[in-house]
């Protein structure tokens, strides 16, 4: 029988502004309430601080840092970059990155950030991919190329010496590695046993002849050539080669040059906290590095040279052998890139007390096994875009979880929707990313804007331009505090998940997103892919999902790789456990006939010791290493583990203390093991997971972040799989306040809560062993049930309509009239005045209203509500600041500031830059109010966006 432990009797309204309250008695807990109310600096958002073209205004540089601190940032990552979008050459050229003048700017930024307590980072190059003017050709990126000629033997032949062609023309700086003779075949099909390999050496300073036997041969000369690829979009005076990322020496030389220059701008007391490596976007090619052949033979125990033609347009007579060699090649590319670049940079950074933030996932032009690459960083970083499909945050989160990293960063809100959205829209996407595992927002981007830039100013081609020139910047603090509180909570304890998904040993590989931006539709900027709705493919990149667990509502999961399975994962009491305490119930294998022999050997131990694994019985090894003996070993171990399970009549087999399942769904196995959903949402259709969650667990709390990413209010019931002796509290990351009086029911396997989630709302539900049951003193709202439009008691709420008789004052400097009178609250775009239609910035609404003594009695609470606000508003009553309103239901408390008789309300409302830019584009013969290099993204048909206060506005009086 359900036991109601407490009942909230207060009918109130969920409001959205930051407030402070005295802290209750400090709990004996790892999770500190003070840290939630006032999050530490390291939980606050970072930003990619673009220094466009390297041009700097030192006065504005200092001002921007001060504003970052004031608005609640953790700091910034300096990103020297070229103006990818500047057709009118608005942005002046600055100095070379890390040249004397650039170092002066860096020194100034370090001094100021240190004095403000901000963390500062720097990109590893001007634009992205490591490189610079200090990179020698020997350290530049390299590719494998070839030339071919038809010859007949027997003969003594001197192979042609001309450099091969690349995808970009005649290759440069080539070194011939070896020559091979392949029996001619019109279909270019061959067997490695038929190949004759010749060295590419010289004899007496002359090119040596090779002796060919009788027959018709295709003579293939294999070269290592420099790509001569330069930095992608460097500032104009900061050119240079991209390094050979597979080379330990090239990485070491690059970072020595980078850091020796940075040292000139820093001191031990004032230095950069981070070095940032952006997504890998080196040209697609057959990657190479000088020691590749030796590394290959050392790791895979066979000579790769007879197989190299498979990388140059030939095919093997046995397609499975070809697949295995090509996989070995790609794995080695991945391992060398990870070991010699990502892992080595971690070691270099640690020697200097710095941290690597590495965007090493499957964005860009991926080569790596992403979990391993991201795991070899201090802070793995993914990305999520606004109104685009580019979401790889789950990948970074899985890497962090399996490699024991607390912080999961993401390049946040990248996109091409210049100034169309604000914090309300951004919160929706950030909440979805939080549920993927994000806990360190890195805005893409915060553009540096010199005084000459005007407004909205200079911007990079992509990004949502969160900087001091944003129209809503002065109201940004509650948004930043929300991010900080949520990030703080999402770093507590360990992530809770039931399922581990092994994604195989391919490189490159991928972790698909759990969810995407729900607003992404085919009419968005960019190309909408035809694979987007194909659930067998990753919606980000279109490649097949490496393992597909099916729909698992209420369950969480991580992806895992060979490296962690073989070196970090163990079995304890039937659970799969990592050294940091992360634990999972089952491991799922990809639906493949091949498997890494090393993984299978480790699985045998894990299952024997009690692990639960789901997957098909493998038939062969995935590598050519040790072939064919490796296949025999795979069959032997698989026969032991799978036993008589055939996936047709017998679907499981006990092996030691563990069990292997075959041809059952993940959900069927979870049900068979009586593993209930971690969080089950009831009472609504939630197939799209718009009510989503993420669960973290400390030694004394279960912490659930719950998000409603839809634009409608939802009344839901939630079952939480927690110890029924624990007591729930509701923590509001918007206000920082805690509700300790919560209605809940004990269930057999957990605790159930009824909740009303407002549009775009989020809450933390924290289950603790003890609670005072006393709400924060400043909490005047019901965090569990919110405001109900039709209260049960008709007289519990009284409403005063204030939707008419407003005066709206605009700023004429931005084209608006001095003021207008209105008898209804409608979007500015509906006005007949172009000055109002095209207005961007802050407008001030004001009106008076009269209250009698009864309405201001101590027995009543008063709130003002607005049907819609675009984008944000700050409310004043009788000159008193009542807070910033930026989230539905657009409500704030005004009780303390009311008086009997005449009262004045002022609402300062701000929209985005879109409408003013569109107005300037539509009126090319008039003086433009705005100035930006991004105006090419707008045209006469660009829509105007709803702005201002809209719909009904009321003051609601609630009986206490």
Image: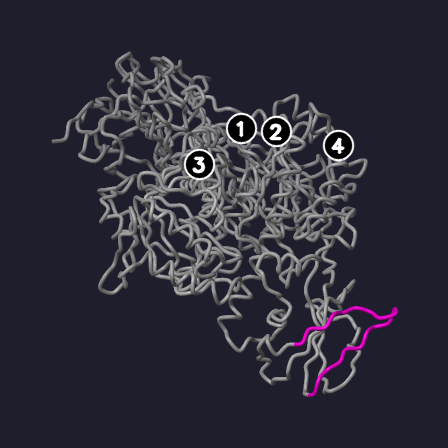
Q: Is residue 509 visible?
A: yes
Boundaries of the magenta span: 196-214
Circles 2 and 3: CB atoms closer than 8 Å: no
Circles 2 and 1: CB atoms closer than 8 Å: yes
Q: Nearer the viewer, residue 576 or 743?
A: 576
Residue wearing tag 3: 579
User: If you read the primary sequence from the N terminus, does the residue marked by circle 4 or circle 2 appear first?
Assistant: 2
Give the SS element for disc 1.
helix
Q: Nearer the viewer, mark 4 or mark 3?
A: 3
Q: Nearer the viewer, residue 139 or 941?
A: 139
Q: Nearer the viewer, mark 4 or mark 2?
A: 4
User: If you read the primary sequence from the N terminus, does the residue marked by circle 3 or circle 1 appear first?
Assistant: 1
In three-dimensional space, the C-alpha distance between marks 3 and 1, rounded to whole angstroms, equals 24 Å
Decide: is 22 above or below 57: above
Mark number for residue 42? 1
Mark number for residue 263? 4
Mark number for residue 119? 2
Q: Nearer the viewer, residue 117 or 309?
A: 309
User: If you read the primary sequence from the N terminus, does the residue marked by circle 1 or circle 4 appear first?
Assistant: 1
Task: Classify residue 509 as left or right of residue 269.
Answer: left
């Amino acid at each position: 029988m359900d036991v109601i432990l407490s009942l909230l009797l207060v009918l109130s309204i969920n409001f959205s502004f930051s407030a402070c309250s005295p802290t209750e008695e400090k709990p004996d807990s790892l999770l500190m309430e003070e840290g939630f109310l006032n999050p530490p600096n390291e939980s606050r958002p970072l930003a990619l601080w673009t220094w466009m073209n390297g041009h700097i205004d030192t006065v504005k540089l200092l001002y921007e840092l001060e504003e970052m601190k004031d608005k609640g940032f953790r700091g910034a990552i300096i990103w020297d970059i070229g103006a990818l979008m500047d057709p009118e050459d608005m942005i002046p050229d600055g100095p070379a990155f890390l040249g004397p003048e650039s170092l002066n700017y860096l020194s100034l930024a370090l001094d100021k950030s240190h004095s403000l307590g901000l963390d500062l980072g720097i990109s590893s190059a001007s634009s992205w991919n490591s490189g610079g003017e200090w990179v020698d050709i020997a350290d530049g990126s390299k590719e494998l190329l070839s030339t071919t000629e038809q010859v007949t033997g027997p003969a003594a032949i001197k192979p042609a010496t001309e450099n091969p062609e690349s995808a970009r023309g005649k290759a440069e700086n080539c070194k011939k590695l070896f020559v091979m003779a392949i029996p001619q075949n019109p279909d270019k099909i061959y067997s490695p046993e038929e190949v004759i390999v010749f060295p590419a050496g010289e004899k007496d300073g002359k090119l040596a002849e090779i002796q060919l036997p009788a027959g018709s041969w295709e003579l293939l000369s294999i070269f290592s050539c420099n790509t001569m690829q330069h930095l992608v979009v460097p500032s104009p005076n900061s050119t240079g080669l991209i390094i050979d990322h597979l080379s330990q020496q090239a990485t070491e030389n690059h970072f020595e040059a980078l850091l020796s220059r940075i040292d000139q701008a820093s001191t031990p007391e004032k230095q950069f906290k981070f070095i940032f490596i952006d997504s890998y976007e080196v040209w697609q090619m057959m990657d190479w590095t000088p020691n590749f052949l030796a590394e290959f033979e050392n790791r895979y125990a066979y000579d790769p040279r007879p197989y190299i033609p498979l990388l140059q347009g030939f095919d093997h007579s046995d397609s499975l052998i070809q697949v295995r060699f090509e996989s070995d090649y790609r794995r080695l590319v991945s391992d060398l890139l990870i070991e010699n670049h990502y892992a080595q940079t971690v070691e270099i950074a640690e020697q200097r007390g710095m941290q690597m933030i590495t965007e090493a996932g499957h964005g860009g032009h991926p080569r790596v096994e992403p979990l391993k690459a991201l795991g070899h960083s201090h802070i793995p970083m993914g990305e999520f875009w606004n109104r685009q499909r580019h979401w790889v945050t789950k990948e970074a989160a899985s890497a962090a979880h399996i490699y024991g990293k607390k912080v999961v960063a993401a390049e946040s809100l990248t996109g091409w929707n210049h100034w169309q959205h604000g914090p309300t829209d951004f919160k929706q996407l950030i909440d979805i990313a939080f549920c993927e595992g994000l806990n360190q927002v890195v805005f893409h981007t915060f553009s540096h804007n010199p005084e000459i830039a005007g407004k909205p100013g200079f911007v990079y081609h992509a990004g949502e331009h969160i900087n001091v020139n944003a129209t809503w910047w002065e109201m940004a603090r509650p948004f930043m505090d929300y991010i900080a509180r949520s990030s703080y909570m999402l770093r507590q304890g360990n992530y809770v998940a039931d399922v581990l998904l092994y994604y195989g040993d391919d490189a490159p590989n991928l972790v698909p997103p759990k969810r995407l931006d729900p607003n992404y539709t085919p009419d968005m900027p960019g190309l909408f892919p035809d694979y987007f709705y194909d659930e067998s493919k990753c919606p980000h990149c279109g490649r097949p999902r490496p393992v597909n667990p099916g729909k698992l509502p209420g369950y969480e999961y991580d992806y895992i790789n060979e490296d962690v399975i073989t070196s970090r994962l163990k079995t304890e009491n039937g659970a799969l456990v990592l050294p940091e305490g992360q634990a999972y119930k089952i491991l799922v294998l990809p639906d493949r006939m091949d498997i890494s022999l090393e993984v299978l050997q480790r699985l045998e131990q894990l299952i024997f010791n009690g692990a639960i694994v789901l997957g098909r019985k493998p038939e062969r090894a995935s590598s050519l290493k040790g072939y064919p003996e490796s296949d025999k070993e795979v069959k032997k171990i698989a026969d032991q583990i799978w036993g008589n399970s055939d996936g047709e009549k017998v679907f499981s087999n006990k092996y030691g203390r563990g069990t292997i399942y075959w041809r059952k769904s993940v959900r069927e196995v979870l049900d068979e093991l009586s593993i209930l959903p971690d969080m089950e949402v009831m009472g609504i259709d939630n197939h799209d997971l718009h009510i989503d969650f993420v669960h973290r667990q400390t030694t004394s709390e279960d912490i659930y972040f719950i998000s409603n990413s839809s634009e409608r209010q939802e009344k839901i019931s939630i079952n939480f799989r927690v110890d029924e002796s624990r007591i729930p509290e509701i923590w509001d990351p918007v206000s920082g306040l805690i509700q300790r009086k919560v209605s809940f029911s004990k269930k057999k396997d957990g605790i159930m809560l009824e909740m009303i989630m407002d549009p775009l709302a989020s809450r933390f539900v924290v289950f603790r062993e003890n609670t005072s049951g006393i709400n924060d003193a400043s909490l005047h709202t019901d965090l569990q049930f919110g405001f109900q439009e039709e209260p049960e008691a008709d007289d519990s709420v009284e409403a005063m309509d204030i939707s008419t008789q407003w005066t709206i004052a605009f700023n004429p400097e931005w084209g608006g009239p001095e003021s207008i009178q209105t008898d209804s609250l409608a979007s500015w775009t509906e006005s007949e005045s172009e000055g109002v239609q095209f207005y961007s910035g802050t407008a001030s609404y004001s009106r008076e209203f009269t209250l009698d003594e009864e309405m201001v009695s101590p027995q009543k609470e008063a709130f003002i509500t607005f049907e819609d606000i675009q984008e944000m508003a700050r409310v004043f009553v009788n000159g008193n600041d009542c807070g910033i309103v930026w989230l539905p239901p657009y409500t704030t408390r005004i009780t303390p500031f009311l008086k009997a008789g005449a009262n004045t309300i002022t609402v300062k409302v701000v929209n985005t830059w879109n409408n003013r830019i569109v107005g300037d584009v539509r009126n090319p013969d008039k003086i433009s109010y705005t100035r930006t290099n991004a105006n090419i993204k707008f045209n006469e048909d660009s829509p105007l966006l709803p702005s201002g206060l809209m719909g009904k506005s009321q003051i609601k009086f609630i009986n206490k």
